[in-house]
């Protein structure tokens, strides 16, 4: 394993959005793909980067 999983707070800080926005996005199927690890949501950094890059595509 080469990269540490990101917490929802890490992703919110990275994207510059509130944590609650990420939770709302998850319920709508939007935003970077997060995975449940027990009771926690974690994100792979490469998934977050891929999602950000796709936002500029039309």
Image (cartoon, rainbow, N blue to C red):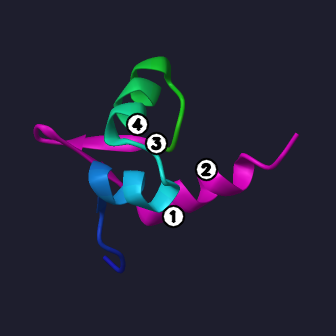
In this picture, is 36 found above or below 2? above
Disc 1 target residue:
46
| Residue 22, label in figure | 4
State the SS at label 4. helix
Sooner in the amino-acid sequence: mark 1 or mark 2: 1
- Which residue appears at 52% of the width and 38% of the height? 31
Sooner in the amino-acid sequence: mark 3 or mark 1: 3
State the SS at label 2. helix
- The C terminus - image quarter: top right
Counting other residues with Cα less than 10 Å from the Cα at mark 3, is it few (<14), some (14-19), or many (20 or more)? some
Marks 3 and 4 in Cβ contact (< 8 Å): no
Marks 4 and 2 in Cβ contact (< 8 Å): no
Sooner in the amino-acid sequence: mark 3 or mark 4: 4
State the SS at label 1. helix
- The N terminus - image quarter: bottom left
Counting other residues with Cα less than 10 Å from the Cα at mark 4, is it few (<14), some (14-19), or many (20 or more)? many
Marks 2 and 3 in Cβ contact (< 8 Å): yes
Disc 2 target residue:
51
C-alpha gap between disc 3 and disc 1: 10 Å
- Which residue appears at 41% of the width and 28% of the height? 26
Magenta-colored span: 33-58
| Residue 56, label in figure | none
């Amino acid at each position: 394993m080469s990269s540490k999983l990101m917490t929802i707070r890490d992703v919110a800080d990275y994207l510059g959005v509130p944590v609650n926005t990420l939770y709302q996005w998850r319920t709508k199927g939007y935003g970077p793909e997060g995975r449940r690890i027990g009771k926690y949501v974690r994100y792979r950094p490469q998934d977050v980067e891929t999602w950000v890059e796709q936002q500029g595509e039309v």
